[in-house]
Image: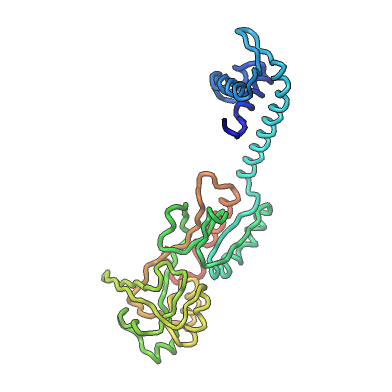
Amino acid sequence: MSKMPDFEGLAMFAKVAEERSFAAAARVMGVSVATVSRGVGRLEERLGARLLNRTSRQLALTEFGRNIAESASRLYREAEETEGFARELSSQPRGLVRLAIPMTYGVRWVAPILPAFLLAYPEVSVDLHLSDASVDLIGEGFDAAMRIAILPDSSLVARRISRVARYLVASPGYLKQHGHPKHPHELVGRNCLGYAYRAQSDVWRLLNKSGDEVSVSATGSLRVTNVEALIPAVLAGIAIAELPEFVASEYLRDGRLQVVLPEWSMQEGGLYFVTPTARTRPAKVDVLADFLIAELSDPAWRMNNRS
């Protein structure tokens, strides 16, 4: 016999004892009379004693049934209250959202807009986990994450917020000293800085308008776990680096950095809001997703107006 209490049988017995009728209990619970009868019979067999005396016209509690009817009814009421509270909690934006975001993007673009969200939803709080390492949403107990990727994890539910271009960049001083490469193959042997959490390791894949694709192994004197740490070395004129658009745009606009190989482009990724599932997602996660998508779908860091 299972050690798990027969909660269903206890609930059905409690409702039969309250209604003094299998048919009335079945109506209240939204199940068939046969289902209620089987549930009570299963509970009697499990407990080893009769709970009810039944005739074609009458239904009465046995002494054993009277002894446990009150406890069974209390369990039923507590279960109803718990379920009602859970429904309210999931339908109203309330509670803690654990959200994982890449560090640089989170600090630069998400943290500044969070006060507006917290003011709009005072009963929601956010535990913001800032790390470039990809977290296991289910295993580590996160409600959601924002990910910058070429393709989202197929095991998760993803909503695309915006595109994210990537650029190979260098300072004007570097290009003056070492020359402008004309073809991706000319990157070989140059100081090309690396990013540890890059999905395709340190291989740069570049495409031109003719559809030609060239892969280059990027090797250099610095490899980092946060893209922000590449910027001082690139600005100092000692290397070439790959930067996402939300980091590179301010430096490209003011001329401190220039695009390397402007006739070639890197495969474009996207910014996604991902959750373990959409079916049972609570309201607190939905309102945060809607807020972030509304605020970040047309970001200030975008270099042009392509959607």
- Image coords of residue 154 (percent x, y): 42, 54
- Image coords of residue 82 (percent x, y): 66, 38
The relative height of residue 74 versus residue 110 in the rendered view (above or below) is: above
**Residue drawn at 68 percent across, 52 percent down:** 123
The relative height of residue 234 versus residue 115 in the rendered view (above or below) is: below
Q: Which residue occupies the foreground of this view, 93 or 87?
A: 87
Q: Quadrant of the N terminus?
A: top right
Residue 263 left/right relative to 240: left
Residue 197 can be seen, yes or no: yes
Residue 66 left/right relative to 128: right
Residue at the far bottom: name it.
177
- Image coords of residue 115 (percent x, y): 65, 62
Q: Which residue occupies the foreground of this view, 201 or 23?
A: 201
- Image coords of residue 226 (percent x, y): 52, 73
Q: Which residue occupies the foreground of this view, 242 or 203?
A: 203
* Count of marks overlaid on the render: 0
**Residue drawn at 44 percent across, 89 percent down:** 173
Color style of the picture: rainbow
**Residue drawn at 47 percent across, 55 percent down:** 159
**Residue drawn at 60 percent across, 29 percent down:** 8
Q: Which picture quadrant has residue 87?
A: top right
Q: Quadrant of the C terminus?
A: bottom left
Q: Which picture quadrant has residue 38?
A: top right
Residue 258 can be seen, yes or no: no
The relative height of residue 239 versus residue 285 in the rendered view (above or below) is: below
